[in-house]
């Protein structure tokens, strides 16, 4: 099956490399031309060139806005795709934008599927990501199965087009809130005189346990390496997507609103070249702030 893969960053690169290693015919493209050498003959000079004759086009880009731009804007990838092709957007995009993009692609005979991923860079390398898939039926899922199975260990159909992106945004907002709460708890404990490693061991074996505590906090916050491989800017975007859903639906969800405000503030303070685990530095910077 011929595949086009656009977006070869922290996540996209290992995902594309797994598809190539799995024997698929893959053409790749990224705005970073410095990646061309790493992909050799699989490299295409433009998104449209990658898309030509592809049966499936996968996007792994920062935002849904960029996905639209690559497909229907300056990238012109959708114009190069044959009718009957399927686009799989693995990016963490905005659900409402995905529904609108799906309608625009359908007018060209192209099917859009949203399949955002969870698991981070290590599981991307192992092909063990969780994929939350929207917009498929059993027939389409069976057709895409070999591709999805090469990058994901768990494929979860979650509903109509956009459902995957909605589920992903909600999960990320919970993870952001959990990370913030755990960083605050560790800072509180440290000021009281508790050893952070001991406190984390207690948390990770008690009711405060979380995936964030067992991975990000243990591997990157405690040793202060801050190199999980997921940008603080992207996490802030994800929390914003969930908060946007809340606003659109007119709901009062104070923890979500507060989490969004905190992450936006952290991004403004720490800048875009920051790993999301560095949120801990933002917490520590403000321990003396007046109430
Ligand atoms: P990244 O910033 O490392 O990579 C994005 C890539 O897209 C870059 O290589 C960039 O050059 C390329 N790009 C940007 N604009 C482009 C364009 N117009 N045309 C072609 N290429 C373009 O981001 P990432 O961490 O790989 O994340 C990608 C998506 O996956 C995001 O939506 C993110 O929220 C989501 N995600 C990330 C992780 C993670 O742990 N990093 C985990 C799950 C989901």
Image (cartoon, rainbow, N blue to C red):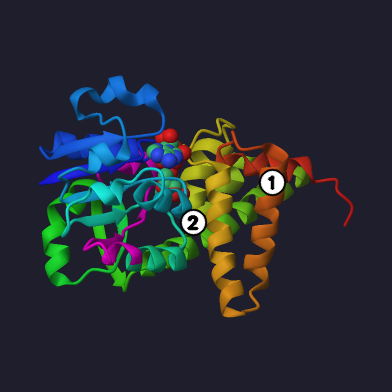
Residue 126 visible somewhere in the drawing:
no
Position of residue 231 relative to residue 245, above or below, is: above
Q: Which residue is mark 1?
A: 266
Q: Nearer the viewer, residue 67 or 178?
A: 67
Q: Which residue is mark 2?
A: 210
Position in image of residue 239 (x %, y %): 56, 58
Residue 96 visible somewhere in the drawing:
yes
Which picture quadrant has residue 50? top left
The image shows a total of numbered marks equal to 2
Position of residue 240 relative to residue 159, above or below, is: above
Q: Residue furthest top?
A: 37
Q: Nearer the viewer, residue 57 or 48?
A: 48
Q: Residues within 10 Å of mark 2 (few under 14, many from 20)?
A: some
Image quadrant of ligand 1 equals top left
Q: Residues within 10 Å of mark 1 (few under 14, many from 20)?
A: many
Report if residue 180 lies within the magenta region: no
Q: Secondary structure at mark 1?
A: helix
Distance from disc 1 to disc 2, alpha carbons, whole Å, reads: 22 Å
Q: Secondary structure at mark 2?
A: loop
Q: Which residues are magenta?
A: 104-128
């Amino acid at each position: 099956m011929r595949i086009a893969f656009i977006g070869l960053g922290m996540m996209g690169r290992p995902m594309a490399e797994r598809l190539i290693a799995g024997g698929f015919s893959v053409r790749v493209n990224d705005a970073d031309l410095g990646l061309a050498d790493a992909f050799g003959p699989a490299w295409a000079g433009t998104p449209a060139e990658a898309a030509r004759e592809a049966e499936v086009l996968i996007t792994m880009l920062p935002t849904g806005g960029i996905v639209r731009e690559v497909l229907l804007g300056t990238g012109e990838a959708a114009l190069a795709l044959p009718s009957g092709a399927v686009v799989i957007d693995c990016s963490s995009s905005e659900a409402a934008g995905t529904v609108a993009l799906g309608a625009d692609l359908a007018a060209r005979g192209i099917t859009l599927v949203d399949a955002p991923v969870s698991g981070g860079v290590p599981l991307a390398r192992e092909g063990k990501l969780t994929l939350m898939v929207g917009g498929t039926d059993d027939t389409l899922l069976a057709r895409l199965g070999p591709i999805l199975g090469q990058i994901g260990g768990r494929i979860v159909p979650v509903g109509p087009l956009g459902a995957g992106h909605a589920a992903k945004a909600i999960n990320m907002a919970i993870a952001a809130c959990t990370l913030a709460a755990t960083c605050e708890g560790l800072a509180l404990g440290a000021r009281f005189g508790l050893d952070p490693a001991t406190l984390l061991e207690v948390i990770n074996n008690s009711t405060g346990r979380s995936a964030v505590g067992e991975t990000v906090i243990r591997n990157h916050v405690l040793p202060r390496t801050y190199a999980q491989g997921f940008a603080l800017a992207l996490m802030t975007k994800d929390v914003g997507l969930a908060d946007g859903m809340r606003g659109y639906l007119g709901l009062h969800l104070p923890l979500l609103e507060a989490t969004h405000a905190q992450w936006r503030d952290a991004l403004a303070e720490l800048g875009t070249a920051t790993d999301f685990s560095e949120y801990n530095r933002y917490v520590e910077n403000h321990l003396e702030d007046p109430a």
